Structure formats: structure tokens, C-alpha cells
Image: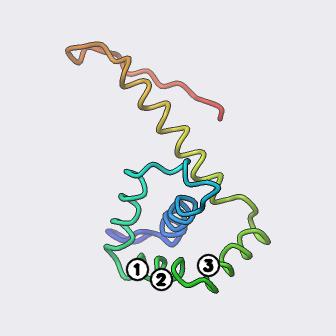
């Protein structure tokens, strides 16, 4: 990754999240807020817009799915499920934070 520029992996993850959020079988894993954020990020760069065009092209979209199934089956679902689990843990800890900002930072490893 170069200074101020996202890596290809970051774009691939965002593309996978958007694809997962658009699929009828898996769209409940991607909140409307997360989908909007991913689309905003992808729309902000040339590489991101290229990735969105790939998803809009039925032939390219199917080719991307086939490549994923052959090379790394389930990787997009893994990213989305992992990010959702992390988000859920963070949100639950924020809700339990004492009033007045008096809290100790505690980190706990969660096996998901």
C-alpha cells in the first residue's frame, strides 16, 4: 500500500462486501449503513469505480464468483461475517460503557 492509496486487497474486500450485500441469499449480513459506506468509498476512486462496473456486468460478476469458488471458496462471506461479528462485539461493549466516560480499556480476544 502506498501513502494515501488503498491496496488491491482493500478494494477486493469492499467489492466482496457489496456483492454479498446485493445477493438475495446474503444481503441480511450487510447493513444499509455498511453498504452505503462501501459504495461511497468505491465511488471515490478510479479503481473503486472499476470494481463497481465489474459487479454491474453480469458476465464479469459471474466470472468473479467462479474465480472465488475455484481459488478461495467462501472468502467474501468470511470477510462479511467476520466484520459483522467484530462490529457486534464493539457495539455491545459501547452500550455497556459507564456514563461520564469513566471506563477502563479492556480488550478481550473473541473467537468467532
Q: CA distance from mark 1 to mark 2?
A: 6 Å
Q: Is residue 56 above or below residue 108?
A: below
Residue depicted at x 44% and y 21%: 106
Label 1 close to label 2 by CB (< 8 Å): yes
Image side of residue 105 versus residue 56, left or right: left
- Residue furthest toward the right? 70
* Residue 60, image x, y percentages: 61, 84
Residue depicted at x 51% and y 80%: 56
Image side of residue 38 versus residue 75, left or right: left
* Residue 27, image x, y percentages: 55, 54
The answer to which image quadrant residue 94 occupies is top left
Q: Secondary structure at mark 2?
A: helix
Dot label at residue 53: 2
Q: Which residue is mark 3?
A: 61
- Quarter of the image with the C terminus is top right
Marks 3 and 2, the one that precedes in the sequence:
2
Q: Which residue is mark 1?
A: 49
Label 1 close to label 3 by CB (< 8 Å): no
Q: Residues within 10 Å of mark 2 (few under 14, many from 20)?
A: few
Amino acid at each position: 500500500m502506498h501513502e494515501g492509496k488503498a491496496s488491491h486487497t482493500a478494494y477486493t474486500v469492499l467489492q466482496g462486501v457489496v456483492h454479498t450485500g446485493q445477493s438475495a441469499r446474503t444481503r441480511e449480513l450487510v447493513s444499509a449503513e455498511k453498504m452505503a459506506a462501501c459504495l461511497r468509498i468505491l465511488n471515490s476512486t478510479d479503481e473503486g469505480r472499476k470494481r463497481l462496473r465489474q459487479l454491474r456486468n453480469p458476465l464479469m460478476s459471474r466470472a468473479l464468483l467462479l474465480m472465488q469458488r475455484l481459488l478461495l471458496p467462501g472468502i467474501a462471506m468470511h470477510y462479511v461475517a467476520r466484520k459483522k461479528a467484530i462490529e457486534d462485539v464493539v457495539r455491545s461493549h459501547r452500550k455497556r460503557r459507564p456514563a461520564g466516560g469513566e471506563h477502563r480499556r479492556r480488550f478481550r480476544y473473541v473467537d468467532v
